[in-house]
Amino acid sequence: MDALATPLNPMRAILDTPGTSYAPRSRARVDAVDLLRGLIMVIMMLDHTRDFVHAGAFSFDPTDLAKTYPLLFFTRWITHFCAPLFVFLAGTGAYLQELRGKPKPELSKFLLSRGLWLIVLELTVVRLLIFFNAHYQTLFALLQVIWAIGWSMIALAALIYLRLRTILVISVGMIALHNLLDGIRVTSWAGPGSPVPGIGASLWKILHEPGIIFPFGYPGPAAQVLYPLVPWIGVMGAGYAFGSIYRMNSAERKRVLLRLGGALTACFIVIRAINIYGDPSPWVAQRTPVMTILSFLNASKYPPSLLFLLMTLGPAMLFLAAVEGRGRSWLSKALITYGRVPLFFYLLQWATAHGLAIVAGRLAGKPTGYLFSDLAFGPPPPRGSGFGLGAVYLLWALGVLMLYPLCRWFAGVKARRRDWWLSYI
């Protein structure tokens, strides 16, 4: 009966204990997961290349419907898939390690230590690669996705001792209900002379409301919390529970992925159309049908709303269903290579995108000094800085190609060797 219920009840299929229909996993990696991870890493580099290269990057938000245009909007919108899947697949990867035989205590210890390591990386290496300066006296940290993954791994280190069903209930509950907290607003710093968040307000910003905090007291160095921890901890927990579908054989897994991905995508469309709950920014009819569609798709990322996560995770599961069991093309092989070294690629793409922006600017005779400043947290770039979207796409493609040999080399190192430190890069 369980085997018959699998395609009819995807959620139950994810939570069921392995039965005779489940295929045991070898120590080999899951190509479909690496392929999706590699794809989102490459798309992520597009967003960061736009940050450094595009002339309007520090002038306005490309999702601001009063100033944007469709191509610029979608250049930013497509990258919305990256952070949710980066976090979600980190949870899936943790489950796959357990499925390949890593004992739970050992996995918990690894998640704790790697989570702490990622937080240190965010505060040190990542900050230097983003800003190309060490102005810690003014901007101590930009707390982004690596910070969120680090804390989520620390939380997951404890959560994995719970039943899988309990982890899923906690995680989905956090994702589905956290928008009820949107109305809670605390003191926000808006510049010299404005109120400064206290300890309680700062903790709330770390948990749910993006904003600037002063970890060492005002007027000490500031930290911008861009990725509050709720609901990212839930996203990673959901990814961990999702990993259990890789106990199934390929045919069963594909059916579950199709049904689950389709259900999440449909939920996004229906809940967004109702326009009552799930996102702090309701969509609004615009001056043209195209702009109205953009408004419909313009879900809130900071923190990621319920609708934002439905919009990104649902199609991602449909993608996994589409590539399930397929052979490798040259493109998929390249993306799998990137997906097998995600943190290595992540660090290199910051330096590469930033460096290419400087080189291109100097070759074109444009100002580049601001690319060594605090960027969006400092004075606006000089007039004439940056390029159009064509240059953004050209330099993005160049950067992705430049990183392939390095990623292929490091993926080979990780495949051949079992040094403990390789799991932390």
Image (cartoon, rainbow, N blue to C red):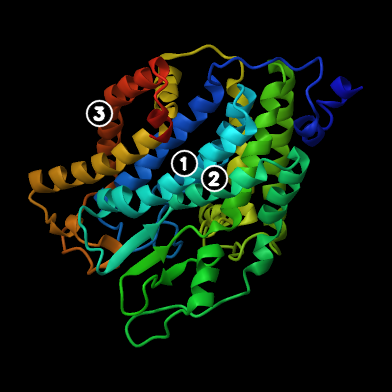
> As shown in the figure, which amino acid type bears the numbered disc 2?
Met
Mark 3 nearby-residue class (10 Å; few <14, some 14–19, many ≥20) = few
Q: Looking at the picture, how far across and down is residue 311, in whole percent?
A: 61, 46
Q: Of the residues under marks 2 and 3, which one precedes in the sequence?
A: 2
The circle on residue 246 is: none
Front residue of 131/81: it is 131
Relative to 285, does residue 83 appear above or below in the rendering? above
Estimate the spatial distance between the alpha carbons at disc 2 and disc 3, rounded to whole Å: 31 Å
Q: Of the residues under marks 2 and 1, which one precedes in the sequence?
A: 1
The circle on residue 402 is: 3
Q: Looking at the picture, how far across and down is residue 286, in whole percent?
A: 54, 62
Front residue of 415/366: it is 415
Q: Are marks 1 and 3 in contact (CB under 8 Å)?
A: no
Asked which secondary structure carries label 1, the reply is: helix
Estimate the spatial distance between the alpha carbons at disc 1 and disc 3, rounded to whole Å: 28 Å
Residue at image mark 1 = 114
Q: Are marks 2 and 3 in contact (CB under 8 Å)?
A: no
